[in-house]
Amino acid sequence: MSLHDRTVLRGIPASHGVVVGKACLVGRSALRVPRRRIASSAAPGEVARFRKAIQASRAEIEGARAALGDGAAADYRLILDAHLLMHGDALLVDATVEVIEREHICAEWALRRTVESLARQLEEASSEYFRGRAADVTQVGLHILRCLTGAPTVLPDVDEPMIVVADDLSPAEAARLSKRPIIGLVTELGSPTSHTAIIARALGVPALVGVSDATDRVADGDTVVVDAIRGELVLSADAAERAVAAERSSSYRAFTARLRSRAGGEVGTRDGELVTLSANLEMATEVEAAAGPEASGVGLFRTEFLYLGRDQAPTEAEQCAVYAEVLEAMSPRTVTFRTFDLGADKLPRSRRFVAGPNPALGLRGVRLLLTHPRLFRTQVRAILRAAENGNARLMFPLVGSVGDMRHARSLVDEVLAELEAAGAAHGEVPIGAMIEVPAAAMMADALAKECDFFSVGTNDLVQYTLALDRTNPRVAPLARPLDPAVLKLLDLTARAARENGTDLSMCGDMAADAFALPIVIGLGYRHLSMPTAAIPMAHAIVERIDTRAAASVAKAALELPDVESVHELVRESFGETLGDLWEAQGLG
Ligand code: PEP
Ligand code: MG
């Protein structure tokens, strides 16, 4: 094949590395539904084929359910139980049979029509409960369709290592995929700070997000190269190119292994200042990696992932068990629990929290919790009770004002008083705010008086400061955290924390951005939290930085008129010291 035939799709590296392997399409787009008319005499055979597919689908789901095991996976058992029940639902099964017999069309087409009409009716229902069932009906329909067409299931049952190619990945799919031999991930949606990207990093395999048309251009079983350093998905690599990619893959792995062997949760800068590196957790199962020697604690536990794959909030007992497990695994290190950050792109399957026409600016984060005090109080009780087992901190997402913080704290005080009155064992926890709304950064001085600590969420801070949707791959290249507008807010926050003696950390992805890190350090941030896999690179960067030099570069950056000038300044100031590390991540 000549280089001319080479097909390359561009994407955004969400988790660094290079991998060559077989593609496996998952999700809706992997399925083509045949539309065949049949003779009336063929209808009984078609109905029999449909019933066999239902049995096969039921058996597959029962198998997946049995394989789930205990612990956090129990959440998914409930979903699968509901799906199993639907396999006997007259509205789905009898209605499809009727369409085959009446309209003389193939089983796939009849099923598709039945499912679409049922889902539409459910979506239009006035009850939230029924609206929430629409997604289940669609998923079950999809599963039976796959059994009918012989297409791979949503979660292919293969032991062969595979590169998953999907339009998007829901948290529930990701959690189930994490049990399969996945060696790479490609999604059409997402930007570096979207939740799809966060999930990709949690899986710890090379991943590209925002790859337009990936599911149309890749066929199941194609050998592809995921170059999540250069940001390329190569569809038609010849043997020589694959060999080069394999070589790049092993040298990147050797490089990260070298970094990992030296990394720890605490690192001294070149001039001897101490910086701590903690882990961000998306799923409780990640705690195993975080509990290794690399992380100084958990700086952000995104608890909403306990809720996102299901319809009902986890109970106090369920939550308490997960939180206690994480605290025990990390003990004596600290675990920072963020209360559910629901809304916008983080909605439970039932979508019972209707955020309005512009969800990123609608009911989200702590605002949503304050309008659902029962949900909030149950979670706070679970965290306070679990805190008996280790060192916990509690923080609220998307705090927008002093009023938000006071309101949330007053509810925590009430829960504490209840626990004390009941003589229930619980721990003492510092309480903090995430600084991720520009208003919170601007009011950081007043907020600091209400908080034991701040943790800066740069993913949202960048989104809201620059008015760039973090879920939209088309604007992702513009969302640059070194924009001076963002730096000014980071500076305000750091100053307010210093002046008020408020503990300060950063848990947004900027803390793991090899290019931005010197400026983050220069602005005075000393506690950083990031995906566990990113810690070794951050460690390597921080130990080469002189904080005094970094502070004077950061000061100069604050005076610059645009992000391009800041990038230029960073390159000039740190290129010599950090160039090889940037190069390794494709930032050259
Ligand atoms: C952030 O916004 O930077 C953050 C850490 O929170 P999340 O990415 O979960 O919104
Ligand atoms: Mg956030």
Image: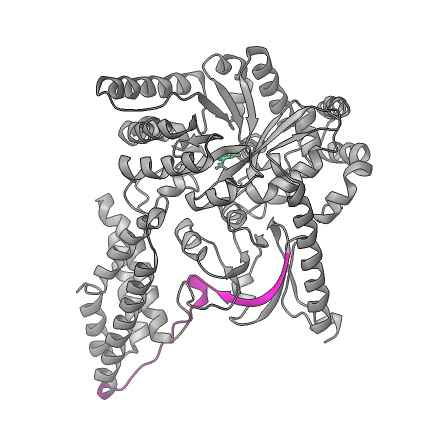
> At which x and y percent is residue 62?
28, 63
> Would you identify the image quadrant in which residue 551 lies?
top right
Residue 146 visible? The answer is yes
Residue 125 visible? The answer is no
Find the magenta span and give its range.
18-41
Q: Nearer the viewer, residue 492 or 353?
A: 492
Q: Which residue shows up at 58% across the image and 20% down it? A: 493
Q: Nearer the viewer, residue 484 or 26?
A: 26
Q: Which residue shows up at 20% across the image and 78% down it? A: 101
Classify 49 as above or below 500: below
Q: Which residue shows up at 56% across the image and 32% down it? A: 458
Taking 358 as reference, is 318 left or right?
left
Q: Which residue shows up at 64% across the image and 37% down it? A: 480
Q: Is residue 19 magenta?
A: yes
> At which x and y percent is residue 360?
45, 36
Classify 205 as above or below 337: below
Disc tally is: 0
